[in-house]
Image (spheres, rainbow, N blue to C red):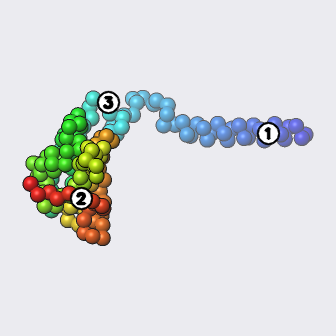
Amino acid sequence: MGSNRARGIRLAVSIALAAVLGVGMVGCSPSGAPASPSHTPAAAQPESSRTPKPTPIPELDLAGTAKQNIAYFNKVGHALLDNNSAANTDGRAIVDGFVAAGFPKNDMEITPDKTSVGLVAWNIEFSVKMNGTCLIGQAGNVGFHSIVAPLVSTGTCLIGLTRKIDW
């Protein structure tokens, strides 16, 4: 009697399981014409049919902050300093390049391009003050790098010795 009861329970569980699976599969089996979605999600569209969004060309916004202008600063810095090792530690060439790109010279700072014993500096830092924030660049043997930073307590962007931009 016990084995009949166990068989009955297994049979009931099997029927219930088959019913649940059958209900879950109702939408999966074709019944006549296959259903087609009225909208194909973008992820399901072929790669060639997606329209790529154009990358915006960075522009200088003198009314903006450093964060709003970092893309343009980087564009200018890479154009000026990548593959131009002669300009990488030439402070005047760097300042003139950024000024030619629209950055105001009177808001710029730069560290000396010579060491205290007259050797060419391995790296120099330069900055542009933009509405209470700073774009800071570094160039030299490390290549070109940049960051956005707040003004320091002196109201400047760079800490330490800087040279006059008097040309």
Residue depth check, mark 2 versus mark 1: number of the one nearer the observer: 2
Mark 2: few/some/many CA within 10 Å (<14, 14-19, 20+) = some
Q: Which mark is residue 162?
A: 2
Residue depth check, mark 3 versus mark 2: number of the one nearer the observer: 2
Q: Amino acid at mark 1?
A: Gly
Q: Residue at x 29, y 56 (%)?
A: 148
Q: Which mark is residue 46?
A: 3
Judged from this view, the residue extending furthest toward the right is 1
Q: Which mark is residue 8?
A: 1
Q: Is residue 26 left or right of residue 167?
A: right
Q: Amino acid at mark 2?
A: Thr
Q: Residue at x 26, y 31 (%)?
A: 49
Q: Amino acid at mark 3?
A: Pro
Q: Position of residue 139 (x, y in %)?
A: 27, 45
Is label 1 in contact with label 3 (beta carbons under 8 Å)? no
Please report whichever mark, 1 or 3, sits nearer to the chain's N-terminal start.
1
Q: Secondary structure at mark 1?
A: helix
Q: Position of residue 159 (x, y in %)?
A: 30, 62
Q: Is residue 133 left or right of residue 96?
A: right
Please report whichever mark, 3 or 2, sits nearer to the chain's N-terminal start.
3
Q: Residue at x 9, y 48 (%)?
A: 100
Q: Secondary structure at mark 2?
A: loop
- Foreground pick, 79 / 92: 92
